[in-house]
Image (spheres, grey):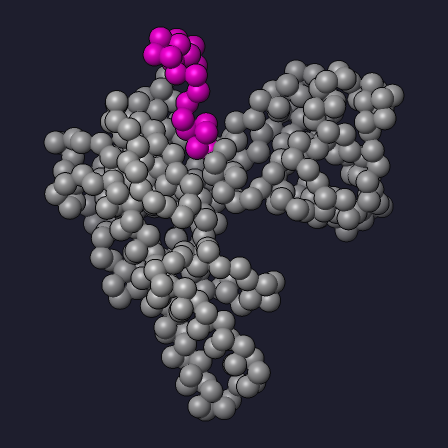
């Protein structure tokens, strides 16, 4: 899964990216250059650590999330539709992390002259929405021309016009397309358009020390954190960071919560495979079947799926071993239509 970190210039996007990835990407943009920084991050999950302590495997692998720090989106850039490299990068993302500036810094002037987190939070949504509206209007014009020429299937043309008119109505009401529900056929139809407001979004208010999060009515989740402090903590040796956090009463880095929120944003869940060779966290969508989830491990396991041996994480850890889980009737055999639950520990049997 790949999430794009977006925001207006000077919002602290790269600071947040560095904090998430323990990186040191330059926090000042290179003049005239379009830059994207990408890194893969482990999803913090204490269950993986506990399972690893139980099995003491050769390898322990956490679930992963990829973040891309995308060059700043200027206010007003969507008036004629976002174009070029920027739009191409945005369209590739599965979701957005929108960084909104709340901090004051005289050495880093705000492009608009003043810091106003509520204004900027809503401004980005408007930019993305306007870009989608332009895309949808262009498609409707093209469909109308095709209908006049009569060169396409009338039923297909009529269905597409109906779909894009619904999109247009929603966007014209200043609502993002993520508010809409689409059937499987419509989702396939829209997949190639890269409509930006269909993508889930998490807003991050990047604050100074002592600031509180602004009150802004959003249609999606948000989190407030001190980006500069979190970046500095993430770059300290683990022992020094722990001492600092204890001194200031910080129980957990806000960035860990942010990573978990990113994970939730894409409606994903975690299941595990365990053994002496490897303890590993895998991701699958919520509502996925055992057979579909087996494909996350290997496509051969999905094609040759026979059954899944399943035990809940809580049962295994609570009872202390797989042998005890079997003895207490907590070990189950499930078929291909079984809906995987978050925390399931699975071993897939396959005919291939």
Q: Is residue 182 left or right of residue 12?
A: right
76 is higher (above) or lower (below) than 279: below
Tell me the residue at 70%/33% (across/down): 344
For image coordinates 38% across by 22% down, the residue present is 234
Q: What is the x, y in percent for residue 294?
A: 72, 43
Rendered image quadrant of residue 271? top right
262 to the left or right of 287: left
Does residue 83 sit above or below 67 in this rendering?
A: below
Residue 271 in magenta stretch: no
Q: Quadrant of residue 202?
A: top left
The answer to whether residue 231 is above or below residue 90 is above
Q: Magenta segment, principal secondary structure? A: helix
Q: Position of residue 306 (x, y in %)?
A: 84, 45
Where residue 67 appears, as percent x and y from the top left, is 43, 40
Which residue extends farthest bottom? 149
Position above or below: 78 against 121: below
Residue at image coords 24%, 35%: 102
> Which of the two residues, 299 or 325, is positioned nearer the viewer here?
325
Confirm whether residue 82 shows in the render. yes
248 sits to left or right of 273:
left
Q: Is residue 20 left or right of residue 99?
A: right
327 or 213, nearer to the observer: 213
Disc tally is 0
Residue at 29%, 56% (x, y): give it. 127
Query: Which image quadrant for residue 254?
Result: top left
Q: State the extent of the magenta-drawn residues as a range.
A: 237-259
Residue 281: percent from left, percent from top? 63, 32
Residue 277 seen in the figure: no
């Amino acid at each position: 899964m790949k999430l794009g970190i977006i925001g207006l210039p000077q919002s602290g996007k790269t600071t947040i990216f560095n904090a998430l990835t323990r990186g040191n990407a330059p926090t000042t943009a290179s003049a005239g250059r379009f830059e994207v920084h990408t890194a893969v991050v482990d999803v913090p999950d204490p269950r993986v650590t506990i399972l690893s302590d139980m099995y003491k495997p050769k390898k322990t692998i956490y679930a992963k999330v990829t973040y891309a720090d995308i060059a700043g989106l200027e206010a007003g850039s969507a008036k004629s539709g976002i174009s070029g490299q920027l739009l191409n990068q945005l369209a590739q993302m599965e979701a957005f992390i929108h960084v909104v500036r709340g901090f004051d810094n005289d050495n880093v002037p705000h492009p608009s002259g003043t810091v106003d987190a509520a204004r900027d939070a809503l401004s980005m949504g408007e930019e993305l929405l306007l870009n989608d509206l332009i895309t949808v209007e262009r498609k409707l014009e093209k469909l109308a021309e095709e209908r006049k020429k009569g060169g396409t299937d009338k039923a297909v043309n009529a269905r597409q016009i109906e779909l894009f008119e619904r999109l247009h109505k929603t966007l014209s009401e200043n609502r993002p397309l993520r508010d809409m529900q689409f059937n499987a056929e419509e989702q396939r139809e829209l997949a190639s358009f890269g409509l930006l407001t269909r993508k889930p979004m998490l807003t991050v208010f990047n604050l100074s020390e002592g600031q509180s999060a602004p009150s802004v009515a959003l249609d999606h989740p948000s989190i407030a954190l001190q980006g500069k402090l979190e970046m500095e903590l993430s770059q300290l040796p683990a022992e020094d960071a722990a001492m600092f956090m204890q001194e200031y009463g910080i129980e957990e880095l806000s960035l860990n919560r942010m990573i978990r929120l990113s994970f939730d944003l894409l409606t994903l869940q975690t299941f595990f495979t365990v053994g002496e060779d490897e303890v590993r966290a895998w991701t699958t969508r919520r509502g996925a079947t055992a057979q579909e989830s087996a494909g996350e491990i290997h496509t051969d396991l999905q094609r040759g799926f026979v059954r899944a041996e399943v035990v809940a994480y809580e049962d295994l850890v609570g009872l202390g071993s797989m042998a005890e889980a079997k003895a207490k009737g907590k070990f189950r055999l499930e078929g291909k239509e079984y809906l995987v639950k978050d925390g399931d520990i699975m071993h897939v049997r396959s005919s291939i």
